[in-house]
Image (cartoon, helix red, strand yellow):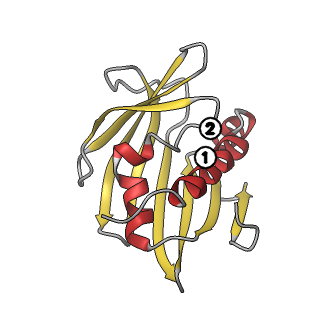
């Protein structure tokens, strides 16, 4: 990771949110594609040594992304993101959850509301992410599960990927 690029991670226990701001040395269209196209998402989303596999992605309002994070021992953790709002190359929001392979939500784990905003910063792109939880208990549960470490690793993997791919 380029140490000169912006990276901020904060937790606000008063409004049950995690806020992440991350700058990438790539164009907005390429960064947008890396967040919205399964062939790119699968290369960075799961923190190593896990790998990511998309079962289905329908990137549109009302659509969803059904994917698995797979451990080196082939233990599979299914997740689903239901897309709510999309403004092409500007922002999107989704409701994320752990689920089974068919997309049935696992209510034992908290759901999270993701709002991702993409903006130009010179030749770079900044992604501002806000993840909202229903309660402080839900927020603390995902933090204890290693969200900060895992998501930071994924963003670093995205940084590496962006150095190797080109725009459409």
Asked if 83 appears above or below 67 in the picture, the reply is: below
Residue placed most toward the observer, 54 or 12? 54
Residue in the picture at 50% in, 56% down: 164
**Circle 2 residues within 10 Å: few <14, some 14–19, many ≥20:** many
The residue carrying mark 1 is 154
Asked if 92 appears above or below 153 in the picture, the reply is: below
Q: For residue 74, what is the image quadrant? A: top right
**Circle 1 residues within 10 Å: few <14, some 14–19, many ≥20:** some
Q: Position of residue 155 (x, y in %)?
A: 61, 53
Residue in the picture at 48% in, 51% down: 113
Residue in the picture at 36% in, 43% down: 39
Residue in the picture at 46% in, 24% down: 106
Find out whether the residues at labels 1 and 2 contact each other: C-beta distance under 8 Å.
Answer: yes
The residue carrying mark 2 is 47
Residue placed most toward the observer, 32 or 110? 32
Q: For residue 68, what is the image quadrant? A: top left
Residue placed most toward the observer, 15 or 40? 40
From the viewer's perspective, is 162 left or right of 148? left
Q: Position of residue 144 (x, y in %)?
A: 75, 35
């Amino acid at each position: 990771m380029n140490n000169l690029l912006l990276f901020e991670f904060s937790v606000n226990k008063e409004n049950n949110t995690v806020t992440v701001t991350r700058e990438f040395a790539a164009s907005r269209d390429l960064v947008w594609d890396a967040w919205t196209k399964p062939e790119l998402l699968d290369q960075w989303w799961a923190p190593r040594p896990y790998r990511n596999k998309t079962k289905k992605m329908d990137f549109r309002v009302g659509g969803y992304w059904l994917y698995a994070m797979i451990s080196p021992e082939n233990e599979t953790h299914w997740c689903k993101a239901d897309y709510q709002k999309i403004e092409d190359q500007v922002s999107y929001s989704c409701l994320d959850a752990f689920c089974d392979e068919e997309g049935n939500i696992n209510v034992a784990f908290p759901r999270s509301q993701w709002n991702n905003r993409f903006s130009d910063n010179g030749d770079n792109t900044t992604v501002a992410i806000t993840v909202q939880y229903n309660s402080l208990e839900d927020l603390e549960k995902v933090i204890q599960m290693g969200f900060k470490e895992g998501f930071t690793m994924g963003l670093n993997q995205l940084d590496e990927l962006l150095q190797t791919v080109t725009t459409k």
